[in-house]
């Protein structure tokens, strides 16, 4: 069974973490496979949105703790440097927007994988656990970067130190994720979100992502300059022309992504 599935529906790439018996926790092969499909998404001009979800009852339980045992167990350097970090960096660099569709529990690096996505949504029964402190580790996979920015230092510190599970509705209320959907509607509603994104002006969304990425490190002057530069680029796209024409003609725009 392949641990990562990639299917294309229209212009949405659906990526499924597929080790359901182990709550989709990552071993090295699975991490490398996810890196590979993210590269395929980046290289495919027909992919205008990415949808990342888990098979079965979980989203992802982080690192496979069994794979840490034994003589040939990978080192922590390898697990982070070669497996998880390149995944997080690929998601942040991917031009197409990434929807993290958290169908069930997301723990450890699995929780932080969801937080690295552009828009994270969850089924109402899903939950998030910064499980690291429970096993004597520190948060990784970008969690210490994204979580305090999303919910503030105090709450991030408490969740990371205590390792308590946060239910998806509470996660949405505190700004950790965008929103929840009722369990029965989750699969369709979250995928429709990705489909909607795939029909929007893709280049403008990619530039928006770049602005959000760079905004955490730029000062105001640098950020205003970058907005100006990218607005000039956005203003040269066919999608900008189409958006204005559609507005003036009082019709729905048909964005082509360029
Ligand atoms: O270099 C490094 O290693 C650093 C990198 C760290 C990155 C990390 O992600 S560290 C954090 C690793 N993850 C965890 O600590 C979470 C471990 N899992 C859990 O705490 C629980 O499984 C959950 C809270 C996620 C779900 O609980 P529950 O009761 O719904 O399910 P369960 O019964 O615990 O799990 C079901 C099966 O999945 C079970 O296997 P079994 O008994 O049916 O054969 C369980 O062992 C397996 N499983 C779940 N998570 C992992 C796992 N097996 C290996 N590794 C896991 N992470």
Image (tube, helix red, strand yellow):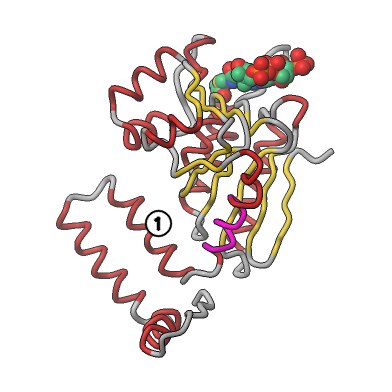
Q: Position of residue 129 (x, y in %)?
A: 51, 22
Q: Position of residue 145 (x, y in %)?
A: 37, 34
Q: Quadrant of ligand 1?
A: top right
Q: Could one spot residue 75 in this view of the protein?
A: no
Does 196 appear in magenta?
A: yes
The vertical placement of 89 against 69, above or below, is below
Front residue of 229 and 235:
235
- The response on whether ligand 1 sits within 8 Å of label 1 is no
Does 185 appear in magenta?
A: no
The answer to whether residue 248 is left or right of residue 115 is left
Tag 1 secondary structure: helix
> Residue at image x 44%, y 44%?
178
Q: Position of residue 144 (x, y in %)?
A: 38, 29
> Residue at image x 75%, y 31%?
20
Q: Bounds of the magenta span?
A: 190-197
Q: Residues within 10 Å of mark 1 (few under 14, many from 20)?
A: some
The answer to whether residue 23 is left or right of residue 117 is right
The vertical placement of 65 against 119, above or below, is above
Front residue of 38 and 168:
168
The answer to whether residue 51 is left or right of residue 250 is right
Q: Could one spot residue 135 in this view of the protein?
A: yes
Front residue of 195 and 5:
195
Front residue of 230 and 8:
8
Toward which corner of the image does residue 234 lie, by quadrant?
bottom left
The vertical placement of 192 against 76, above or below, is below
Toward which corner of the image does residue 244 lie, by quadrant?
bottom left
Q: Which residue is mark 1?
A: 209
Q: Position of residue 240 (x, y in %)?
A: 39, 80
> Residue at image x 54%, y 63%?
196
């Amino acid at each position: 069974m392949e641990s990562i599935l990639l299917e294309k529906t229209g212009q949405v790439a659906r990526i499924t973490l597929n080790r359901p018996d182990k709550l989709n926790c990552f071993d090295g092969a699975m991490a490398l496979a996810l890196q590979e499909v993210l590269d395929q998404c980046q290289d495919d001009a027909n992919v205008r949105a990415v949808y990342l979800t888990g098979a079965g009852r979980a989203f992802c339980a982080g690192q496979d703790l069994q794979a840490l045992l034994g003589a040939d167990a990978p080192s922590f350097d390898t697990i982070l440097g070669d497996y998880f970090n390149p995944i997080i960096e690929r998601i942040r660099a991917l031009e197409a927007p990434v929807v993290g569709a958290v169908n069930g529990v997301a723990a450890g690096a699995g929780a932080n994988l969801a937080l690295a996505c552009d828009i994270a949504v969850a089924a109402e029964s899903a939950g998030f656990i910064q499980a690291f402190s429970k096993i004597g580790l520190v948060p990784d996979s970008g969690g210490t970067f994204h979580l305090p920015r999303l919910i503030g230092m105090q709450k991030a510190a408490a969740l990371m130190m205590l390792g308590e599970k946060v239910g998806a509705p509470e996660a949405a209320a505190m700004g950790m994720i965008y929103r929840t959907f009722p369990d029965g509607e989750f699969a369709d509603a979250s995928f429709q979100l990705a489909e909607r994104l795939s029909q929007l002006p893709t280049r403008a969304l990619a530039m928006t992502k770049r602005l959000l990425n760079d905004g955490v490190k730029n000062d105001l002057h640098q950020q205003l300059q970058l907005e100006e530069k990218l607005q000039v680029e956005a203003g040269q796209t066919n999608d900008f022309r189409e958006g204005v024409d559609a507005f003036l003609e009082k019709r729905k725009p048909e964005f082509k992504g360029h």
